[in-house]
Image: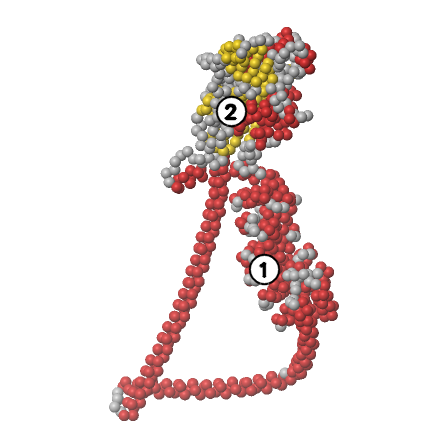
Amino acid sequence: MASYKNGRGPVKVDRTQGGATANLRVSSSFKSKTSNVRRGSSGANLDDHVSGRVRVAVRLRPQNAEELVADADFADCVELQPELKRLKLRKNSWDSDTYEFDEVLTEFASQKRVYEVVAKPVVESVLDGYNGTVMAYGQTGTGKTFTLGRLGDEDTSARGIMVRAMEDILANISQGSDSVIISYLQIYMETIQDLLNPENDNISIVEDPRTGDVSVPSATMVDIRNHKDFMELLRLGEAHRVATNTKLNTESSRSHAILMVHIKRSVAEMESDIASESDHSSHMGNTLKPPIIRKGKLVVVDLAGSERIHKSGSEGHTLEEAKSINLSLSALGKCINALAENSTHVPVRDSKLTRLLKDSFGGTARTSLIITIGPSPRHRAETASTILFGQRAMKVENMLKIKEEFDYRSLCRRLEIQIDKLIAENERQQKAFEDEVERKTIEAHKRISEAEMNYADVLEREKMKCQMDYMESIKKLEEKWMSNQSKYGNSGFINGSRGGKGESHVYEDVTELQKMLQKEISLRKEAEEEIHNLRNSQLLWTEAGANADVVKLKKLLDDETHQKQKLEEEVHLLQSRLSQLTCESGQPRYPQYEDQGNGETSSIASIHEQVGLQKILSLLESEDPNVRLHAVKVVANLAAEDTNQERIVEAGGLTSLLELLRSRSFDETICRIAAGAIANLAMNETNQELIVVQGGISLLAMTAVDAEDPQTLRMIAGAIANLCGNDKLQTRLRSEGGIKALLGMVRSRHPDVLSQVARGIANFAKCESRASSKGAKKGRSLLIEDGALPWIVQNANNEASIIRRHIELALCHLAQHEINARDMVSEGAIWELVRISRDCSRDDIRSLAHRTLTSSQTFLSELRRLRVEI
């Protein structure tokens, strides 16, 4: 008669010689009841519970060297039937007890197979948001630590459950949005100690009064990002774990080791549980819905082995350790017995081990228990106790519960950043709107003033016209009246038909008028004769007095004519050589536009040597536009060579070029070429100071206002940009309108012009930054005071790389001075600095932006307020 046992209790089997007739009551299913656990479900109800029995696997340890010698004459007390998932425990040679488990692992089972059948389902559940426990129980020396905590440094195939579980966890999480935090503890002599921080040797257990969950908040929590860090922590913990040498095991663990792995995962694209009433409300709900996170906790427990004192040979302090171990294991067995029998009272508070494993047995965790046994018949009693512990554990039912919650903090941070961006954008738009209103108002006032002036002019003209018409009418009336008076007066005098006092009076008046008229006519004739006489006398005097001067003037005129003919011959020579040069090269090339070939350079040099620099410069003042044009081309080409610049300046060429700008009597082409020549000369620091002394900044600024051609503006912007690189000229550039002119040229919108403007701003900002670092400058940047910051922010991400690079440099240099930080924050420049520190293609600019952001208290406080990490 043999007795069979399984997870539901012992049953009897009758045997006869001809065979075995079994009346076996076995469990209908030994599989876990967690097959309906929802994995990856986005719409899971947080309050759903799933029933799941504790799964138990048994693993047989191979015989060691001592057992091979001592038990050579005895049969193993254990017989495994892995295909039937059964284990036979022999009482004697003819009788045995049979037990059934969820998995039966022979002594040849690999570590990988043990992990896959015991721990992997638990790890997958933890990744889905459930709590999970993997625990090893058995007699000391039966391979619990080998099964769970083997590191596999010498042989990777020997890696234990802890290492393999962490490999799977790290392979299935996202480093950006998910987190893995571990703590490693041991329960030694009923005291919870931190294996990662040995000084923390008395950790208390905290129980949530609302949910009943237990935690150890004072334990060291380490965020794991890669497998290497985890392995180092495991080695550190194993080094601090208490172990000793006994008769049963050379390295017997004297404490219960507990590895806790907390996993937080973000669940993307979750379905909304609230039905939307309209398309708009549905859109708003999806926009404002907080992300869902799942929290799972994996607990791996390597229990200290149970032992009998007389077999282990423990004494002294080791004996006290054994007593503490057996007491905690006995408390665990009592809890499992109470849960298996559905007792109303479960004594979880009898031990710190049972308090920490409250959720693993009878709680909400998915639990797998592996019991380890040895084959030796000498330890049959300990093996039977271990098997019975596993049988009772199989009767424990847990109610699995997924741990999901809404990540309101993440949503709040995201919305705060969005709100801050919208506020900044609204402020910028409000400022732009106010500026536009102000511009429109000024324009309206200007138009009103022009209309009033036009109205006043029209009114004045109409008034004058009315007056003229009035005077003309009066004149016509007077003439008509005079005609009538003359007609009627003569008629009365001759015919005598109109006599009387009135007619006599009219006749007298007419007579008086006639006398006055005759008098005026005679006076006029006398005046005309006198004027004629005076003119004749003056002409005679002038001719007599100027005879001596005529000869002198005629001689001077002849000299001037001769000199003019000589100059015209030289000009003709220059024109013929320039025409020949133009025919050879296709079209004139200027250093500021294209590179010169050696042939053309030698031709210009030969003209310079044959004609002379002074004569070429004198032609800049010629009244002939073509002569001036050819002369300024020659000077511009000469100025492109560094060797010629000093001679041009000494000969007064810089003054002549500036005079061309000052006269404002040349065309656009001459203006462009002259500005290009000045830009070339402005590359030298000495020449820069001469340009400023001779009023070059204001001349360039005035020329920029009148110019419309993009190439002309490019030359002017290039000249000012070169001046911006001189530390000594910062104040003069601003006071004489150089910065205003530079910013005004952005109206062209031509990429070449914008690149020169951006270069000038970058040079100016760099000089300011250098002066501020030396303490030579106080106060805000002159660029900010002149209103350059909005344009800089607007073009910081320009499509043209050359413009973008200069603007990024300018932003970094402006941001290095703390007093500029508030203006840059208000104008939104901080966002561009963050972008530059992350995305800029140049390492030096990117590191400069990062260093600037981290060194400014204003920027750091604003980034903390916006919850932006750099």
Q: Is residue 783 left or right of residue 437?
A: right
- Residue at x-position 63% and y-position 63%: 674
Residue 283 pos. (x, y %): 42, 40
Residue 767 drawn above or below residue 67: below
Residue 855 drawn above or below residue 787: above
Whether label 2 touches label 1, CB < 8 Å = no
Answer with the quarter of the image where residue 387 lies: top right
- Residue at x-position 41% and y-position 88%: 518
Residue 531 or residue 65, whichever sits in front = 65
Identify which amino acid the numbered label 1 is placed on. Leu
Answer with the quarter of the image where residue 691 lies: bottom right
Q: Is residue 214 left or right of residue 813?
A: left
Density class for disc 2 (Cα within 10 Å; few <14, some 14-19, many ≥20) is: many
- Residue at x-position 62% and y-position 23%: 110
Residue 690 drawn above or below residue 413: below
Answer with the quarter of the image where residue 620 lies: bottom right
- Residue occupied by mark 2: 131
Tell which residue pokes out farthest to the bottom in this image.
495
Residue 165 or residue 324, whichever sits in front = 165
- Residue occupied by mark 1: 713
Residue 866 or residue 767, whichever sits in front = 866
Residue 145 can be seen in this image: no
Residue 848 pos. (x, y %): 63, 43
Tell which residue pokes out farthest to the front in this image.
18
Label 2 sits on a secondary structure element that is strand
